[in-house]
Amino acid sequence: MGTHLIGDTSEVVVGRGRPRPLLPPSATRARVALLVQPGAEPVGDAVADGLDVPVERLALREGEEAKTLEAVGEVYAWLARIGLGRDDTVVVVGGGAATDAGGFIASTWGRGVEAVHVPTTLLGAVDAAIGGKTAINIGGKNLVGTFWLPRRVVVDLDVLEALPERLRREGAAEVIKAGFIAAPGVVDAYRRHGVDVPLESVVEAAVAVKTRIAASDLRERGERALLNLGHTVGHAVEFASGLSHGESVAIGMVAEAHIAAAKLGFEGVEMVVSTLERTGLPTRVDGLDRDRVMELMWRDKKRDRDGLRMVLLREVGRPEVVHVEADDVWPGLEAVGV
Ligand SMILES: NC(=O)c1ccc[n+]([C@@H]2O[C@H](COP(=O)([O-])OP(=O)(O)OC[C@H]3O[C@@H](n4cnc5c(N)ncnc54)[C@H](O)[C@@H]3O)[C@@H](O)[C@H]2O)c1
Ligand SMILES: [Zn+2]
């Protein structure tokens, strides 16, 4: 399997098991701080065994709890105790919440130390761990963060294949999103196999989409916005409904497909719906207040003066950032039951 580069310094390695040595060469690294998400301990053990430098290990808090200022403060205090130096490395093992928090910590400790991520969820492997956006939650979600490219991201297909179905479905929304943006073969694979798709056939392609787009726009000034397909409606649905991120993005992709049909003549609405249904992801949501969802969307940072910038498909593989107004959005929401 392959290696994908973002610039000269950030590589994403997709394969089975872990590369040996796990870490990129360094003449000065004296130790590793290993941060492991609860639930990912077996991978943490294997990673610790495979390191040829002294390792200090700490358990992160569970899920989003790791992304609080308090939890980050606990990790800083621990790094001070173990004396992690400027030439040392932070290795993070876990899902997107772990790599968001651990990446933030690596970017700020000593004004920035090397980060290496070993994502253990499908969402983390194709999205969160790649591309250097770090974040913690202060009041609102992801309001504080940095851009800090991990030196290496190790995607282990054996780990992803062993995930419970819930986590493979949750990540599938982002894999399918990458497919709609730039990898039609991924969409075909999910249409054929649903959530039990051979991950080997789709993860590498989704990683390639994420690395290519992130590399072209590291600071999210332009093209990187394309990765927000399904997320403008999806985030609002997530906040209003309490559905998971992946479920909400699935519903968002359907609503935005309807909007794309009206604005750009997109002809694939049925295909979007059936791909997501085949994967066991929701394509409608009942009981939400449409005004509230609109309000949440308009509060989002992707708005301009009298509308929103939304990523819409002209066809699969041809996304565009399009200015939309409220009148464009209503029918899309209505089509998914909002
Ligand atoms: N930085 C970015 O570009 C970016 C992009 C997308 C999402 N994110 C962030 O990612 C986070 C979501 O990531 P996530 O979906 O991975 O959630 P998560 O990190 O909260 O992990 C979900 C669950 O997976 C469990 N888990 C982890 N590894 C496991 C394993 N090997 N086997 C069994 N269970 C395991 C964890 O215990 C946890 O309960 C959010 O905080 C989101 O903001 C960041
Ligand atoms: Zn997402």
Image: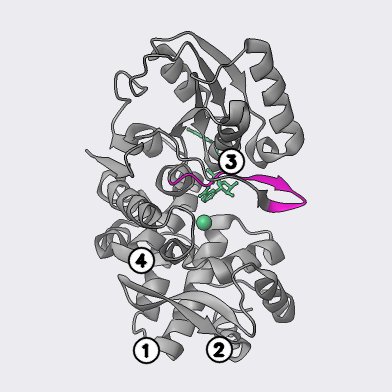
Region rendered in magenta: 131-141
Reading the image, the residue beneath label 1 is 265
Quadrant containing ligand 1? top right
Amino acid, disc 2: Asp
Could you give the CA–CA distance between mark 3 and mark 2, rounded to whole angstroms? 34 Å
Quarter of the image holding residue 100?
top right
Whether label 2 lies within 8 Å of ligand 2 gets the answer: no
Q: Residues within 10 Å of mark 3 (few under 14, many from 20)?
A: many
Whether label 3 lies within 8 Å of ligand 1 gets the answer: yes
Could you give the CA–CA distance between mark 1 and mark 3, rounded to whole angstroms? 37 Å
Amino acid, disc 4: Ile
In the rendering, which numbered label is found on residue 97?
A: 3
- Name the image colouring: one colour
In the rendering, which numbered label is found on residue 295?
A: none
Query: Seen from this angle, which residue lies furthest left?
Result: 1
Q: Position of residue 85 (x, y in %)?
A: 56, 17
What residue is shown at x 58% (from left), y 84% (from top)? 329
